[in-house]
Image: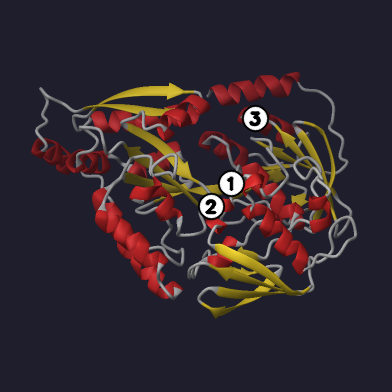
Amino acid sequence: MRIFILIGILLLAACGEASREGLRFGLSSRPVTLDPRYATDAASTRINRLLYRRLVDFDDGFKAIPSLATWQRLTPIHYRFSLGSEGRIFHDGSPLGASDVKATYDSLLAPKTASPHRASLEHIEHIEVLDEDTVDFHLRHADVLFPGRLVVGILPAAAMASGHPFHSRPLGSGAFRFLAWPEEGVLRLHRLADGQMLEFVHVPEPTVRALKLLRGEIDMLQGDLPAELVVWLAERPELDLQRGRGSGFAYLGFNLKDSLTGQLPVRSAIAHALDRPAIIRYLLRGAARPASALLPPDHWAGHPNLPTLAHDPERARRLLKSAGFDATHPPRITYKTSSDSFRIRLATVIQHQLAAVGIDVRLQSYDWGTFYGDIKGGRFQMYSLAWIGIQMPDIFRYAFHSGAMPPDGANRGRLKNARVDQLIEAAEASQSLEQQAGYYRELQYLLLQQLPYVPLWYEDNVYVARREIQGYRLARDGNYDGLKQVVRR
């Protein structure tokens, strides 16, 4: 209700009409860098896709497909990439060739570059340019996922050698070229196909972002809106709203070293105390689907037949009783979350559902930096987070292998399970994607039994635009590629 009152007040206070020059896209977070060697946040990564071309992309099932190049696996440790004809001209007019590919990946591998993407590429032994259309990658060990790792945008070798500031003046060969970054919250690009100007506008507050959309001060936005605001916007005749299945995975995480949340019966009780369908229906307004694993079932390495964790309060109470808890001696758990208003509402609903089976939950909310620091540092019993934009199944090593505990990975719950490690290592040693998928499916079934995470749901992607803005298509991973063809009618 407060959202709608605020919108009403702001609409009454607003006056005038926005300029209609260019297309404006509202962002909840501004990009950190326009150098793809360093981009890790969602806004930077998605905008860099528009500015740069990469060797490889992914299809709707998250399998690697050609982008700039096709490839051959000559041996398990030798891949040859052949550049096609499209996307071969940088925005300064210079040609993109195999030497630029080599220079980009040599830079990523150089310790002095300190790229966060280096770890996934360290098994590259050397890169060899055969001619300007052909480049070979030689690996230290076999990796059937290797083509899918080559998704960093290609930069021009000459500009890298001269110290060009890509972070603030990007230079790629993508569908858009850089125009200006006049202030932190405004970034302007130029669409090569038709000269259309596109402006990204940072508006962190979702209600204000919705107001600007209604007033025509921005033309479109995607994601990061409270569910009730999405429902309200869908009813506005001047707007067009699209929903699409997403792959963002929401979960409850646990400290497995804790004397309470380290107990499987307690985690299982929490899993069966949760009423996911009710949360999805009433809090998320239907904009999600229940999850049983980190990867969605339609991912090529996903498990299509995992059971759903049923809402079963009686079973939850029996599990707690088996662990020695009852009404006079309830388990008491601290649940940490961010200070985002939606995350607090979600935590409050989960707190209420767990209380119904006899679990006493104390909520603690912090600003994002403090909250995330506590999670990485292991200072929690239970927390909620989401994995966004997952494409490669090697996420399982990063999130669950015993060798990936922070700071060496994101095994934040400190899971240490020999069978989990064996399945991850067997998958990585596989000689085919089919064999690898089998190991990962067995792993996902095991993780559902052990519950280092309680899977919650996969959140939908939502896009809202002025009615005259047409042609945008939502992507599964939430990228902004729809901006390549969107137009004002």
Please, what is the three-letter code of the amino acid marked with disc 1? Pro
Q: Quadrant of residue 13?
A: top right
Residue 222: in sight, yes or no? no
Disc 3 versus disc 1: nearer the observer: 1
Residue under label 3: 204
Disc 2 versus disc 3: nearer the observer: 2
Residue 413 place in picture, x, y as percent: 34, 40
Residue 216 place in picture, x, y as percent: 78, 36
Sooner in the amino-acid sequence: mark 3 or mark 1 = 1
Q: In the image, is residue 402 above or below residue 419?
A: above
Tell me the CA gap for discs 1 and 2.
Answer: 7 Å
Residue under label 2: 119
Residue 112: in sight, yes or no? yes
Residue under label 1: 116
Q: In the image, is residue 416 above or below residue 302?
A: above
Please report the residue visible at 46 percent of the width from the left and 67 percent of the height from the top.
300
Which element carries disc 3, helix, strand or loop? loop
Please, what is the three-letter code of the amino acid marked with disc 2? Ala
Tell me the CA gap for discs 3 and 1.
Answer: 26 Å
